Image: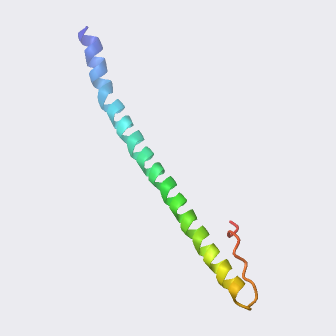
């Protein structure tokens, strides 16, 4: 029985570090997802404003489509 507890005790730090790593990565990726969503929303609003200002003016139209990567 002592051998089993010693084995679990030896694995516990590794498992805990793995769980902490997973949690940190999960939080980082979730924050990135929300930041990208917010940026896309702001960018769409800016494109709409630019399109509206181009429609109101007599200047040559400007391409307001999403940039190609």
Q: Identify which residue, 28 or 40, lies in the foreground.
A: 40
Q: Could you tell whether 32 is left or right of 8 in the image?
A: right
Total numbered circles? 0
Q: Quadrant of the C terminus?
A: bottom right
For this orientation, the residue located farthest to the front is: 56
For this orientation, the residue located farthest to the left is: 2
For this orientation, the residue located farthest to the bottom is: 58
Q: Which colour assignment does the render follow?
A: rainbow
Q: Looking at the image, which residue is at 70% across and 90% down?
A: 57
Counting from the top left corner in percent of width and height, residue 25 is at: 43, 46
Counting from the top left corner in percent of width and height, residue 1 is at: 25, 8
Counting from the top left corner in percent of width and height, residue 29 is at: 48, 50
Instruction: Examine the rendered structure and indicate whether residue 34 appears above or below residue 56.
Output: above
Instruction: Examine the rendered structure and indicate whether residue 31 appears above or below residue 67.
Output: above
Q: Looking at the image, which residue is at 69% across and 86% down?
A: 56
Q: Looking at the image, which residue is at 69% across and 75% down?
A: 64
Q: Identify which residue, 3 or 24, lies in the foreground.
A: 24
Q: Identify which residue, 9 or 21, lies in the foreground.
A: 21
Q: Identify which residue, 19 or 5, lies in the foreground.
A: 19
Q: Could you tell whether 34 is left or right of 19 in the image?
A: right
Give residue 37's quadrant in the image: bottom right
For this orientation, the residue located farthest to the top is: 1
Q: Could you tell whether 27 is left or right of 69 in the image?
A: left
Q: Looking at the image, which residue is at 29% across and 24% down?
A: 10
């Amino acid at each position: 029985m002592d051998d089993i507890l010693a084995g679990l005790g030896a694995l516990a730090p590794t498992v805990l570090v793995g769980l902490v790593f997973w949690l940190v990565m999960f939080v980082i990726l979730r924050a990135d997802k929300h930041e990208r969503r917010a940026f896309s929303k702001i960018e769409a609003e800016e494109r709409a404003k630019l399109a509206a200002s181009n429609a109101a003016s007599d200047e040559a139209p400007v391409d307001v489509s999403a940039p190609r990567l």
